[in-house]
Amino acid sequence: MSKILTSGCGITFPGEKPTWVSVLKLCGLNITDLSGPAISNTLILNQLITEIHNQRYDYVICQLTSKKKLDVEINNENKKYMTNDPIRNFSYKGFWPSSLSEDSDIKKMYYQYLYSPKLDEDDTIIKLLLLQNICRSNRTELLIMQGYKMNWQNDLVKNIKMDFDFVIQDDYKNSKWYEHHDFSNHNTVPNKFYQIDLARHINKNFLQLYGLGEKIDKFNV
């Protein structure tokens, strides 16, 4: 059976809500999922690159998230900020996925005085290039998807093999399923109906595994 490695933010993470990863796992696929709730592109890519150095996979699916996200390694000094966050008050593998928000003064100060948009984008692109090169060397098929509109500024991104016209959040908002979206707690994760369509899109345009389409179609019965 083909080995598949995935990572992404809440769009991919099968936590409280089912995602396309949940659909593909229920269809019997062998998936190692490294996604996490609200995590940044830095953590998404770091985990993928580390894992493919340790294990060989047939397919890698990288779901990029939005820019300006912030992962903070938890220690005794900053744990209180995580605990007091009204939304992102949880940890993931020792990190506080504090995400993009201005719910606390410390976040406001970070984005006002310390955040560097160019470094954020450059870091993502360079890691994507590394991921792409490793997959090519390992003869591993790679799919890179934009979860949110990225508005790339660095021309180096043209060296990334990616469908720049497909953005999950935009596709979701234009779908018939968006009218059923759950807006509670500033949620942006697509609902389960769209997640089935996204699993279908991934198989049709990337995996193309025999019989998988028929299994996914059964979710709509």
Image: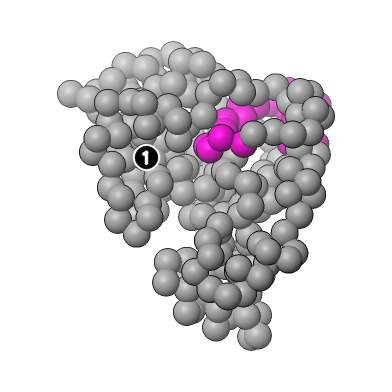
Residue 187 x, y percent position in the rendering: 37, 52
Tell which residue pokes out farthest to the bottom in this image: 76
At x 42%, y 72%, the residue is 86
- Can residue 191 be seen here? The reply is yes
> In this picture, which residue range is highlighted in magenta?
128-150
Asked if residue 6 shows in the view, the reply is no
Dot 1, how many residues are within 10 Å of its Cα: few (below 14), some (14-19), or many (20+)?
many
Outermost residue toward the left in this view: 221
Q: Which residue is mark 1?
A: 190
Q: Is residue 132 magenta?
A: yes
Q: In this orientation, which residue lies closer to the viewer: 92 or 114?
A: 114
Question: Residue at (33%, 31%) from the top-left corner?
Answer: 194
Provide residue 169's location: percent of width, then percent of height.
Answer: 45, 35
Q: Name the foreground residue: 126 vs 206.
A: 126
Residue 108 position (above or below residue 174): below
**From the viewer's perspective, is 130 left or right of 206?**
right
Vertical position of residue 112 compared to residue 182: above or below: below
- How did the renderer colour the structure? one colour
Residue 190 screen position, x and y as percent: 37, 40
- 178 sits left or right of 33 in the view: left
Quarter containing the C terminus: top left
Asked whether, in this view, residue 199 is left or right of residue 31, the answer is: left
Q: Which amino acid is tagged 1?
A: Pro
Magenta residue check for 80: no
